[in-house]
Image (spheres, coloured by chain):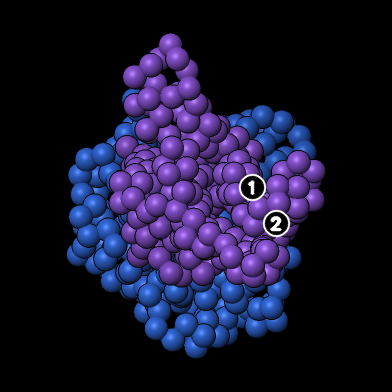
Amino acid sequence: MWTIYKKEIRSFLSSLIAYMVMLVFLGATGLFMWVIKGNSVFDLGLASMQVMFEMAPFIFIFLISAITMRSFSEEKRLGTLETLTTRPVSDLGIILGKYFAGVSLLLISLLPTLVYYYSLSKLGQTEGNLDTGAMWGSYFGLVMLGMAYTAMGVFSSAITDNQIVALISSMALGFFFYVVLGMMGDISVLDAIGKSLEWFSLQYHYDSMSRGVLDTRDILYMLSFSALFIGCTKIVFESRKW
Amino acid sequence: MTKIYGIQKAVNNISFEIEPSEIVGFMGPNGAGKSTTMKMLTCYIPPTSGEAKVCGLDVSDQSIQVRKHVGYLPEHNPLYLDMYVKEYLAFAAGLGGVKNVNERVDEVIALTHLGKEKHKKIGQLSRGYRQRVGLAQAIIHDPDVLILDEPTSGLDPNQVMEIRDLIKNLGSNKTIMLSTHIMQEVEAICSRVIIIDKGVIVADDKLENLRNRSEGKWLVRVQFASVVSGDELKKIQGLLELTALGNNTWRLAGDNMQFRQAVSQFALSSNLEVTELVSEKDSMESIFRQLTGHVDNL
């Protein structure tokens, strides 16, 4: 598994995609946080990273899909899946290797945003006066959310040998589970059903973590969400044997 | 074992056994089920029914164990084109559970004569070198069994010779099964040949035995400048059969090695001008054609 993990990280870093993803992510969050009028820290006058954490899930839908779209589709297209799966490695090992490589890249691209945190704490009226708890909670939630997205991305990549199809289906899944299900509670016609549907959305649990409250239910939800999609990937992956 | 894709039987109840350190040629026309059989042996796809064992290990139940003992070069030799040769081999070694990765990579590079190309990207290599990389990744974990699916297809004659030599060298202590549809290849490196057609084994024998099947028949194709009747040709010494191919061309079968000389002698003595006289000694080719259903009426 770690051999695959290392190879994936390497090929990410030697391709343009990784750098573009990081650039776009940092560029977008940076813009929303510091520059764009109306939302920026200076306009709000609050030492809070709320803006970034509100935007990040949407940016992630695109970016993580772009990271994971290659993982299996490229191997299928090249035919290297055949050499890979005839090595003494389990199917789950291959999937997890690719999955964790995606998650690591996500962490790496989140890392520079810690600079925002530092700047904010310096900028505060009383230096260092920042809701640290909420911020770490948000970071944790964002990582969890990213892991869920990565699992969806890997799954989407496994169902096709076309990167574009993988990209689009992964974005569609992300949109559905974050945005569409997240809106269900606001639709009055659906009433109670809508509320319970909302509970299944990624947004519901992400928001709850963003408040800085780490509820085991939210963590459990996020982890089982990832596990579910990794399981689905394994099923798709093994379908060659049917 | 049998493999069924939907309603199509790709491999139908075939059964064979290969002795340790044998080099077996696996032949058959396109679509005969060669690759499918190999994919089953390498645990890429499971057989629909029946069982396959490699080194005494079952491909379905002890798949991971089997894979440790098998080196596989798939058809078309898929490689990561944007990886460096060394990098890729190190990756393959890591997956194969090799302990001293760097050492083993250098060893394999030397073995496959990739020294000059080891710092290049695989995408920059010519087909011959890519094929070597494919072979290198197949032997990197020092497997007991090598399964090579058309290792020389698409190469130029020099490269073909090099790859064959490589395989031969490797074969000294490994069991090798290679698929091909080139007769000369089998004659050059294999000790035994299995021929399958439409998913069924039609021949499985030592090369010599197979060759002997057409023993007692030497084929000569001859073209005369003018019309010659079949009756006249029957005067040729040692003639067994004759077939008219049209345009004054005949295929003659004789009963001895000197049959070609006999034909030319006959032409001389009966004052016939010969425009072409070829001995069709490639008997393997005709055996193959007979066995796989494209029979020429000899």
Q: Is residue A159 above or below residue B61?
A: above
- How far across and down, in percent of the image, does residue B58 sit? 21, 57
Q: Is residue B41 left or right of residue A123?
A: left
Question: Which chain wears purple?
Answer: A
Q: Are marks 2 and 1 on the same chain?
A: yes
Q: Quadrant of residue A23?
A: bottom right
Chain for numbered disc 2: A
Pick whichever, B172 or A151, lies toward us. A151
Which chain does tag 1 point to?
Answer: A
- Foreground label between 2 and 1: 1
Q: Position of residue A213 (x, y in %)?
A: 40, 52
Residue for badge 2 = A26
Tell which of A121 and B278 is nearer to you: A121
Q: Position of residue B146 (x, y in %)?
A: 40, 66
What's the residue type where badge 1 is placed?
Val
Disc ID at residue A127: none
Q: Residue at x 30, y 51 (%)?
A: A216
Which chain does blue denote in the image? B
For label 1, the residue is A51
Task: Indicate the amino acid at tag 2.
Answer: Leu
Quarter of the image where the N terminus of chain A is located: bottom left
On the image, the x and y values in percent for residue B275 come to 76, 45
Direction from residue B150 to residue A205 in the image, left or right: left
Can you tell which quarter of the image residue A22 is in? bottom right
Res B170 seen here: yes
The span from disc 2 to disc 1 (Cα, nearest Å) is 13 Å
